[in-house]
Image: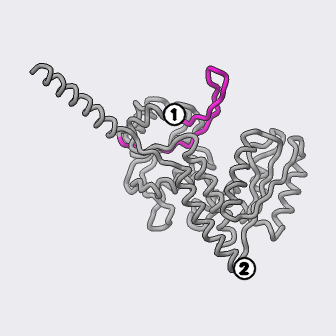
Amino acid sequence: MNMIANSLKNYLKCRQIQINFHRFSAVLLDGKRISKQVQNEIKAKLDYRQKNGLKVPQLTVIQVGNNAASETYIKNKLAAAKYVGIDSKVINFNENVSEKDLISCIKDLNTDANVNGILVQLPLPNHIDKKLICNIINPNKDVDGFHYQNAGKMFYDIENSIKACTPLAVVEILKRSNIQTLGKTAVVCGRSKNVGLPIALLLQADSKKTKWGLDATVSICNRNTSRSQLSDLCKLADIIISATGVPNLITADIVKPGACIIDVGITRIQNENGTFKLVGDVNFEGVSKVAGHITPVPGGVGPMTVAMLMQNVLNTVES
């Protein structure tokens, strides 16, 4: 009798562990899968344009130096462009190129009717003013959405502005994953003008006035926000989006059970054996046991950012 009772007790204990596991094991928001959906939609539109004799957009990428990470990013962008049917090319400069020569190249592309999108791959060498270069690009060809006219236009005309690709990627992940945002509480960790602030703007925007609006109540933190304050805000948040580049900033103890976690951060760290790996801002192993939904790093926001770049390039010939 005791043996039966103990067996039943052990079964119930194991069953409870399984229930708790399923209850708190987050759904993976697969950026690769969602990005393929977006790319297939873009491809269908470009196939139609080509079959009907309409203009197919052309993207020109400018690379300065041979930064390994930049080369990987460019490779991914060119592969996506080829897949969807966007013409693309890369202009390479050595790392010692003068700012004057780089500006001259961009000005030529600005006036080239065959070029629809211009992208200068960042980072740039220290002797080149990144802000100046981004603002030399014709704002109508600025498919990164970094030009001050496009950044400013987001505040007054979201619907018709060219938006930065990473904020668009976050919105698309939330929308296509059916994450409820209306009236929800969101925390954005990160205040950069190209990522954190635009994400916060789109999250709180009115969906009755723009299709990009998500109607959330938003708090913005940064890498200098005290741990106690960050914890207080995150524990109340239905959605946490982190884009600081600080590994393990978001840990399980500050996450509300069932929250949606979007990890935009990406940092290259060295393992004990000397190899390197990419990690995000979120402690994935711990947080995934508490959250309801979570993006991986890599494979989350990154692929979607590339997909939204393709959408921005398509928009240059559709608008």
N-term mark: 2 or 1 = 2
Tell me the quarter of the image containing the N terminus: top left
Q: Is residue 302 left or right of residue 253?
A: right
| Residue underneath mark 1 | 225
Q: Marks 2/1: CA distance?
A: 54 Å
Q: Quadrant of residue 146?
A: bottom right
Task: Residue type at mark 1: give it.
Answer: Thr
261 within the magenta span = yes
Which residue is at the front of the view, 316 or 213? 316
Quick check: can you spot residue 38? yes
- Marking on residue 53: 2
Q: Is residue 3 left or right of residue 216?
A: left
Label 2 environment density (alpha carbons within 10 Å; few <14, some 14–19, many ≥20): few
Chain part drawn in magenta = 258-281
Is 263 positioned to the left or the right of 3 in the image? Answer: right
In the displayed structure, would residue 264 be above or below residue 213? Answer: above
Give the image location of residue 165, x and y in percent.
62, 54
Instruction: Specify the color scheme.
Output: one colour
215 or 250: nearer the eye? Answer: 250
Q: Residue at x 71, y 64 (%)?
A: 86
Question: Residue sitting at 40 percent across and 30 percent down?
Answer: 253
